[in-house]
Amino acid sequence: MDFNTFIEVIISIAIVACMGCIIKIYAATLKMKSRLDFNHFILKEKLVAAKQENSTLVNKIVLCNEINSKLIQSFFDIINKLLSLQKFIFEKGQ
Amino acid sequence: MIFMKKKLLSLTFLLLISFCFSQNHLKIIDSLKTVIFNKPSDSIKIKAYGDLCWYYRSVSIDSAFKYGNLALKLSKETSNQAGEAQAYNDIGILHYDLADYTKALRYYDASLKIRSILKDTMGMAALYNKIGLIHQNTFKLDSAIFYATKALKIYEDKNHVRYVAYIKSNIANIYRGLKQYQKALETHLEIAEVNKSINDNLGLTRTYNNIANAYLFLKDTVQSETYYLKSIDLALKYDYKKELAGLYNNYGGILHDMKKYTKAINYNTKALKLREELKDNYGITSTSLHLAGLYLDLGDFNTARNYLYEGLNLSEGFNINELTMDAYDKLASYYAFKRIPDSVLYYKQLFKSINDTIYNSRITKEVAEVQEKYNAAEREKEIQTQRAEIAEKELKLNRKNTQIIGLVSLALLLFVLGYLLYNQQKLRNKQLQKESELKQALIEIETHNKLQEQRLRISRDLHDNIGAQLTFIISSIENLQYGFKITNNKLKGKLTDISAFTKETIYELRDTIWAMNKNEITLEDLQGRISNFIDKANVSASNLNFSFTIAEALSKAFVFTSVKGMNIYRVIQEAVNNAIKYAEASNIDIQIEKKDDNVLFSISDDGKGFDFNEINAGNGLNNMKKRATDMGATIIYNSETGKGTNIILTL
């Protein structure tokens, strides 16, 4: 085998190997992209669900805050009314 | 007899190369000069120069050369290859006419090269024919047959019957040169039929001449004479002067052989006259010597002498060795008749000398040809070696090119490979970064949710605790009211007021807890809650008529957020409470309906109504407005004193 033939054989093998590598890398890239896209999709779904839950919780907190302020106010009003009643009973008893 | 045959051959060749002779050449020349004078385009000028060269051929050979060279020069200057090929062809013909066959061949070769490039097959065929004629004239009959066959093949492919006949005629003449007279005769007879079929009278005239010659060589003088006469008739009929001159000369030769001297002299004189008219120097010389021979045989030595010296002068003047040799031979005979041995010896020596010259010249030419052939073979060998070397170099070059292409392809593939790896890594990083961002956001939101849930749990504990305490207060008050007979109205009123206020607080707490326990509130949920409220209101205000309707177009599964649902419920509750407390109404109507894409909540009463400008909007109206604003809805109060009130909440 002369030098030129040897070179040609080497180049041919290198070309074939390169083409094989390209195909393998391309396939691996596609597979990886598909896996990462799936993970991405799952995370997005979880995030959407968490946001929905958050929205529900915020609504509940809003309601809670509303009733709390009203409830405390009413509670003090009742206590005042009871104290007023107590005062009235004391005055009547004396 | 040998000279006679040679003369016949030469004459026939001359006949064959003469095309389209006309008496009006000078007129045509004038008109062509007018065309050039009008400064036409270069291509037309080249054509005119070429035509002038052609027409001057029979008038003035020098002028013909001048215009031929002008055509060649202009063609070269304007890169007009077709014109250049035609000019080479025309100049070659002029050299042929002068019997300068070496130069003629050179010009024909130059023309052939260009026409080969231009793929002008018809032009090539014409050149092959002319080259064949040169070889025929120089007795290289194998080459003559080779070129004539090449021309014949092209004309046959193109189906040019007339030209096929011409070429066949030439080939037949070559056969005659090869002494295959019978074959030559058969071919000429065949051509004559073709000439007749295509009405080619000029061709037929020449063919009859050739047939007559062939019969002559076959020693059939009767048939030969018949065909000469046929040919002469045709030439006379169509006025083919050049052919007629040759025919008269040839026929005269036969008559000479038949010893019909007077008749022969008559025809040869006619031939001489025509040739002088045509300025055919070769013909004039040949016929003069022919007449000299006739007069010698007749014994008219003086006339013979005149023709002999005239012929000798012409042949020497035009350097026609063959005819000069003939003149010397006839002069030797003349002086023999005159019994002057010194002169006989002198002309015999001259004859021998010129004969040797011609013979040597032929030998030299043949040696040169052999040398040329040897050189050509050597050159061919050298060319073959060079071709082999070139082929080897080409092979090596191709191999190197293949290797370079392979290396470039490899480099490209490596680049693609690198790019793919880089792209893969980039994609991975990008996706991981996105994933990380999403995870971070998810963690944050989940933490926030947990915190909110914790807050809600604490709030629920608080609500449960407060709810229990409020229930205890209500229970204690009710026990007090029923356990002790309370007669003090003020005390009784205070207890009732505390009990009612506490109950109302508990109801509000329950309503809110109801909303809080739901992630979302459907229209159906809202309907149930409003119905409960109406029922309770109906108990406390039994003189009022309540009506509650939901439009059928509204889906019961219509969904609101818990805050929105609570706000809607509170607005309706507030509106109904206002109607009960302040409006003195007898009918309260609650309607939920759909208008366009909106949901309308309408609360109407037929109470005393109010003027919005006259009353102070208390917490009730403001609360309703605030809640509507919070949930992005609009609220409209329609009321007029004495005409009831209508509140519309549009969502």
Image: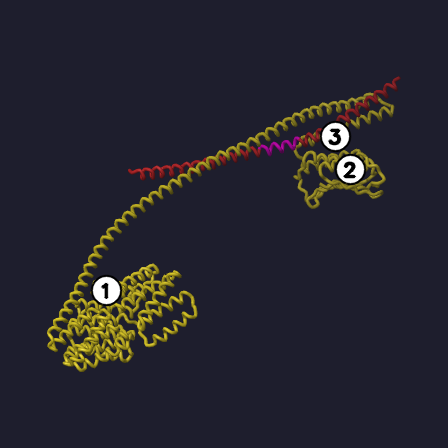
Chain colours: A red, B yellow
> Is-magenta flag for residue B593?
no
Extreme residue in the bottom direction: B262
Residue A46 in the image: x percent, y percent?
Answer: 58, 32
N-term mark: 3 or 1: 1
Residue B529 in the image: x percent, y percent?
Answer: 71, 35
> Disc 2 residue type?
Ala
Separation of marks 3 and 2 at Cα, in angstroms = 16 Å
> Disc 3 residue type?
Glu
> Is-magenta flag for residue A55?
yes
Can you say which quadrant of the picture contains the N terminus of chain B? bottom left
What residue is pinned by disc 1?
B135
N-term mark: 2 or 1: 1
Can you say which quadrant of the picture contains the C terminus of chain B? top right
Residue B378 in the image: x percent, y percent?
Answer: 23, 52
Q: Which mark is residue B508?
A: 3
Q: Secondary structure at mark 3?
A: helix
Segment tinted magenta in the rendering: A46-57
Parent chain of label 2:
B
Residue B197 in the image: x percent, y percent?
Answer: 28, 74
Q: Overall secondary structure of the magenta stretch? A: helix
Q: How many marks?
A: 3
Separation of marks 2 and 1 at Cα, in angstroms = 133 Å
Specify the quadrant of the image occupied by residue A84.
Answer: top right
| Residue B534 shows up from this direction | no
Q: Secondary structure at mark 2?
A: helix
Q: Which mark is residue A72?
A: none
Extreme residue in the front direction: B342
What residue is pinned by disc 2?
B575
Taking the image as shown, residue B87 lies to the left or right of residue B544, namely left
